Image: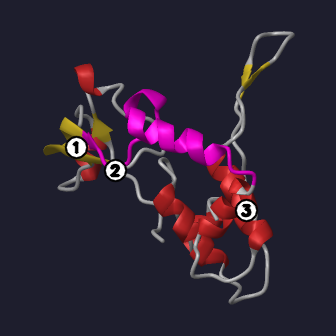
């Protein structure tokens, strides 16, 4: 995993709505200093300055799943497979097949990948996200991290973090 880091990226014009939080992207741009407006803050900063990336191009590395992006051949295969009564067990066993057992955990992770349903409150029409969260607890060496790492490669929008830095900000 990675320790979360942040840089400031300014995207303008048609680049502003190309990605969402959690998308894995590659940005091309110009690395520039943030200009100081003058005054005492500029004198105190001295020769150091903050920087930002002026974005010129955004490329999504991991794209989400949209039904209109799939071809008819794939949709026919999915419809054929969906009629199998043991598909839930087969799909859960296909998650990290190199790890033996932990079928209940793998089924929970499968449901995590499929996600929940966004609901709308009847009283004030507020949208409630249908995201499913998971907490894995267990003895050391039970393959918790390996399962999460496998899911992070499969999920379209996922950030895998570990370590003290991510625990401090609540990202474990």
Front position in the image: 135 or 92: 92
Q: CA distance from mark 1 to mark 2?
A: 8 Å
Q: Secondary structure at mark 2?
A: loop
Other residues around mark 2 within 10 Å, as few (<14) / some (14–19) / many (≥20):
few
Q: Which residue is under mark 3?
A: 89
Is 121 situated above or below 114?
Answer: above
Q: Which residue is under mark 2?
A: 7
Residue drawn at (62%, 60%), measured in percent from left and top? Answer: 171
Circles 1 and 2 in contact, beta carbons < 8 Å: yes
The mark that comes first in sequence, 3 or 1, is 1
For the magenta stretch, what is the residue range?
59-85
Residue drawn at (49%, 58%), measured in percent from left and top? Answer: 154
Front position in the image: 116 or 15: 116
Residue 84: x %, y % from top left: 69, 50
Residue 99: x %, y % from top left: 63, 81
Q: Which residue is under mark 1?
A: 53
Q: CA distance from mark 3 to mark 2?
A: 42 Å
Q: Is residue 134 visible?
A: no
Is 38 situated above or below 61?
Answer: above
Residue drawn at (73%, 80%), measured in percent from left and top? Answer: 101
Q: Secondary structure at mark 1?
A: strand
- The question of residue 65 being in magenta is answered with yes
Front position in the image: 110 or 21: 110
Q: CA distance from mark 3 to mark 1?
A: 46 Å
Q: Is residue 102 visible?
A: yes
Q: Quadrant of residue 142?
A: bottom right
Residue 164: x %, y % from top left: 59, 74
140 displayed left or right of 157: right
26 displayed left or right of 172: left
Toward the left, the furthest residue is 30
Front position in the image: 49 or 136: 136
């Amino acid at each position: 995993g990675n320790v979360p880091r942040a840089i400031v990226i300014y995207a303008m014009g048609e680049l502003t709505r190309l990605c969402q939080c959690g998308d894995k992207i590659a940005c091309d741009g110009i690395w520039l200093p943030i200009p100081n407006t003058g005054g005492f803050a500029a004198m105190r900063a001295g020769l150091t300055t903050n920087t930002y990336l002026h974005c010129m191009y955004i490329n999504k590395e991991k794209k989400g799943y949209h039904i209109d992006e799939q071809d008819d051949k794939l949709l026919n295969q999915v419809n054929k497979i969906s009629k199998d009564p043991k598909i839930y067990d087969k799909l859960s066993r296909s998650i990290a097949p190199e790890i033996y057992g932990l079928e209940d955990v793998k089924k929970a992770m499968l449901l995590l990948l499929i996600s929940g349903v966004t609901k709308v409150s009847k009283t004030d029409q507020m949208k409630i996200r249908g995201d499913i969260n998971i907490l894995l607890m267990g003895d050391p060496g039970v393959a918790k991290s390996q399962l999460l790492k496998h899911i992070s490669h499969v999920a379209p929008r996922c950030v895998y973090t570990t370590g003290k830095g991510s625990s401090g900000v609540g990202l474990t």
